[in-house]
RNA sequence: CGGGAUGUAGCGCAGCCUGGUAGCGCGCUUCGUUCGGGACGAAGAGGCCGCUGGUUCGAAUCCAGUCAUCCCGACCA
C-alpha cells in the first residue's frame, strides 16, 4: 500500500528505520549516534513518562535531579561498575575554548585543562551514592526512595534509533534500605511496576526473571528484568531492576545507625526504563502500513477526516465534526479534526495510519444524509458505519477493544514463537529459523553461556521467576541441569 | 580499531569507466480540473557535484590527500 516502503518480511531493520522516520517520531542528528526526537515522538514519550511517574509516586517514590557530570574518581570506587562502563564513557577534559591562532574558528584552550576529568553520566549510581552518604545517618532516614528523569550518555560503537543511541532519555530509581529483605522487596516491586506498564499500557506481554551473571548490571548482586519478543523473533530487554546489595554503600561509605544502635551499611536498589520502550512499542505492534499504537498511550486516539467536494460541503461537515470532537473531548478522548483542504482524504488516511492513530472517523456527504460516521480501526484495518447517536460510547468501546486485541495478538505471537530445545542441533535449527524465545537446559556456568553466545549470538535473556524445576542436560556441554532458561538473540 | 561502501537540489538517486553548458523521481510554488484509499495536466523555483591540492585549454568525471557518513565485526538499555 505504502510506496517505496519495505515490508517487515523484506527487510526488518530497514522497515523499522523507515517507519521511525516516516511516522515522524525521530531522526538521526548531525551528532554521531545521537537522535532528534520529533514532536510526535516526544508526545508519545511524555505520555509514557506521565503514566510511569504516577506509578512511581503511588509506590512511594519522589523525583529529584542529580548532576550530569561525575568526577572520574567516583567511578573507580566500585570495581565491577567501572569495568562495565569504562569503555563507553564520554569524558570532559577542558572547560574553555579560544580563538584559533590561524584565525579560523576555535580550539581547545590547553590552559583550561581540568585537574580531574568529568565523566558524562552513563548512569548515576556513583554520584547519587556519594550524595546519599550525607543524607543518611539513621534508620529514620530510611527507606530513601528517589527517582530521576534524565538523559545519559553511553558511547556505543553502533547505534539504532530509539534502541541504542549515544544519548538517551530514561528514568533511574535509586533507593536505600535498612535491610536486605526490604531492598529485595523493592527490587521485585519495581519489576512488577514495569511488567504492569508493559502489559497494561504498552500492550506487550513480557517475561519476568533474573539475568545470568554474564548479563548482570555492573555492580549489582542480582539483576531482574522484563523481556519482550519482537516480530522478527529477537528479544528486547524492556526494563531492569537491580538489587545492589551493599556494594555501593560500601564503596561510598553510606552507613546508618539502626534502632539497636548498630552501625551498618545500607542496602540498595536501582531500576530504569528508557526511550527504548518506544522502540519496543514499534517493533512489537506495527505492520506494513505503519505504526500501531495502543490507545492508552497514543498521543492522538481518534482523528476525524472530512470528505468533501466543495467549500459549502466542507462547512457543513466541519460543523458536525466540531460537535463530535467536543463530545469526545468531554469524555477524555484525545481527538483531532483534520479539516485541511490542502491534503486529500486518501493522503490523510495513509498519514494517520503511518502514525498509528487507533481510530479514524470519516464524515462525507453520504454520512451527512444518513446521520452516520465511518469508523476504521488501526489494529485490524476494519471499517464500519455507525449511527452518530451515542457515538462516544462506541468510540470508548472500540478503543478498549483495540488495546485488548493488541495485547492478545502480541501474546499469541509470543506463544507461537516460544520453543523448547533439548539438543544442540534443535537449538541451532530454531535460531536459524524463526528465532523466538528458546527454553533450554544450561549447566549454569558463565563459560558455557559465553561459548553459546560466541557460536550462535544467542544469550540467556533471563531465568524466569518461580521457574519450574526439572532435571535435564545442558544443550551445549551435556552436564546436568535443574531448570530450563530462556535463550534468544536480542537487540 | 580491523573489513567493505558512499558523499551530486529538502529527500532518494543517475551521470564518472571513455573529461566538453548539471540530470531524473519524489517533495516544493502557481493555475486549472479533481476529492469515499497517497489524483491529473500545464508552467515554475531550487546546485561551491563533501573539502584541499594536482594533471589539463577545460574536471562532478582522472590522480593524490583529507574530512564525513553508512554497513559488517569487537561493545551495548
Image (spheres, coloured by chain):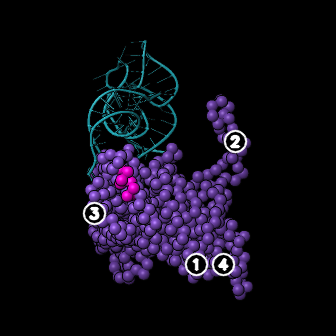
Chain colours: A purple, B cyan
Q: Nearer the viewer, residue A142 or A407?
A: A407
Q: Which residues are magenta?
A: A314-321
Q: Earlier in the sequence, mark 2 or mark 3?
A: 2
On what subunit does the disc labeled 4 rest?
A
**Which mark's residue is nearer the viewer, 2 or 3?**
3
Q: Which residue is mark 4?
A: A142
Residue at point 35% right, 59% down?
A360
* Callout 2 touching callout 4 (CB < 8 Å): no
Q: Earlier in the sequence, mark 1 or mark 4?
A: 4
**Which mark's residue is nearer the viewer, 2 or 4?**
4
Displayed quadrant of residue A317:
bottom left
| Residue B44 as seen in the image, left or right of residue A215 | left
Whole-angstrom CA distance, mark 4 to mark 3, is 58 Å
User: Looking at the rendered structure, which numbered label has been put on residue A110?
Assistant: 2
On what subunit does the disc labeled 1 rest?
A
| Residue B59 as seen in the image, left or right of residue A381 | right
Secondary structure at numbered mark 3:
strand
Residue at point 33% right, 65% down?
A388
Whole-angstrom CA distance, mark 2 to mark 1, is 46 Å
Q: Earlier in the sequence, mark 4 or mark 3?
A: 4
Residue A29 seen from this side: yes
Q: Which residue is mark 1?
A: A183
Is the residue at mark 1 from the same chain as the one at mark 4? Answer: yes
Is the residue at mark 4 from the same chain as the one at mark 3? Answer: yes
- Which residue appears farthest toward the bottom when viewing the image? A260
Q: Earlier in the sequence, mark 2 or mark 4?
A: 2
Amino acid at each position: 500500500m505504502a510506496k517505496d516502503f519495505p515490508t517487515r518480511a523484506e527487510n526488518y531493520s530497514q522497515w523499522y528505520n523507515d517507519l521511525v522516520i516516516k511516522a515522524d517520531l525521530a531522526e538521526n542528528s548531525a551528532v554521531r549516534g545521537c537522535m532528534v526526537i520529533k514532536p510526535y515522538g516526544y508526545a508519545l514519550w511524555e505520555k509514557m513518562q506521565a503514566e510511569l511517574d504516577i506509578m512511581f509516586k503511588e509506590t512511594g517514590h519522589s523525583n529529584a535531579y542529580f548532576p550530569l557530570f561525575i568526577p572520574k574518581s567516583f567511578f573507580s570506587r566500585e570495581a565491577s561498575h567501572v569495568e562495565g562502563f569504562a569503555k563507553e564513557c564520554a569524558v570532559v577534559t577542558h572547560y574553555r575554548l579560544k580563538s584559533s591562532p590561524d584565525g579560523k574558528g576555535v580550539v581547545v584552550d590547553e590552559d583550561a585543562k581540568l585537574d580531574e576529568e568529568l565523566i558524562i553520566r552513563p548512569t548515576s549510581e556513583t554520584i547519587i551514592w556519594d550524595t546519599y552518604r550525607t543524607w543518611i545517618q539513621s534508620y529514620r532516614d530510611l527507606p530513601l526512595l528517589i527517582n530521576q528523569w534524565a538523559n545519559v550518555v553511553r558511547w556505543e560503537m553502533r547505534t539504532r534509533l530509539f534502541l541504542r543511541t549515544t544519548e538517551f532519555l530514561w528514568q533511574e530509581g535509586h533507593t536505600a534500605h535498612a535491610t536486605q529483605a526490604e531492598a529485595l522487596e523493592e527490587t521485585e516491586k519495581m519489576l512488577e511496576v514495569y511488567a504492569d506498564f508493559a502489559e497494561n499500557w504498552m500492550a506487550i506481554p513480557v517475561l519476568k526473571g533474573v539475568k545470568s551473571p554474564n548479563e548482570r548490571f555492573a555492580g549489582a548482586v542480582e539483576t531482574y528484568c522484563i523481556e519482550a519478543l519482537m516480530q522478527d523473533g529477537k528479544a528486547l530487554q524492556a526494563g531492569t531492576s537491580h538489587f545492589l546489595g551493599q556494594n555501593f554503600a560500601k564503596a561510598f561509605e553510606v552507613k546508618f545507625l539502626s534502632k539497636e544502635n548498630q552501625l551498618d551499611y545500607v542496602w540498595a536498589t536501582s531500576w530504569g526504563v528508557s526511550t527504548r520502550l518506544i522502540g519496543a512499542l514499534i517493533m512489537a505492534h506495527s505492520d506494513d502500513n505503519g505504526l500501531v499504537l495502543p490507545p492508552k498511550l497514543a498521543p492522538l486516539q481518534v482523528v476525524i477526516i472530512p470528505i468533501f467536494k466543495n467549500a459549502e460541503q466542507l462547512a457543513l461537515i466541519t460543523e458536525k465534526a466540531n460537535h463530535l470532537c467536543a463530545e469526545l473531548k468531554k469524555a477524555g478522548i484525545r481527538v483531532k479534526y483534520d479539516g485541511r483542504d490542502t491534503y486529500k482524504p486518501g493522503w490523510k488516511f495513509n498519514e494517520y495510519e503511518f502514525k498509528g492513530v487507533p481510530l479514524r472517523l470519516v464524515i462525507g456527504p453520504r454520512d451527512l444524509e444518513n446521520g452516520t460516521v465511518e469508523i476504521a480501526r488501526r489494529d485490524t484495518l476494519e471499517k464500519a458505519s455507525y449511527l452518530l447517536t451515542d457515538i462516544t460510547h462506541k468510540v470508548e468501546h472500540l478503543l478498549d477493544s483495540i488495546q485488548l486485541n493488541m495485547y492478545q495478538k502480541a501474546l499469541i505471537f509470543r506463544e507461537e514463537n516460544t520453543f523448547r530445545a533439548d539438543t544442540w542441533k534443535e537449538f541451532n535449527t530454531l535460531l536459524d529459523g524463526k528465532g523466538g524465545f528458546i527454553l533450554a537446559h544450561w549447566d549454569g556456568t558463565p563459560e558455557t553461556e559465553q561459548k553459546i553466545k560466541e557460536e550462535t549470538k544467542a544469550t540467556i535473556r533471563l531465568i524466569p521467576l518461580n521457574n519450574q524445576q526439572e532435571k535435564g542436560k545442558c544443550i551445549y556441554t551435556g552436564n546436568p541441569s535443574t531448570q530450563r532458561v530462556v535463550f534468544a538473540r536480542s537487540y
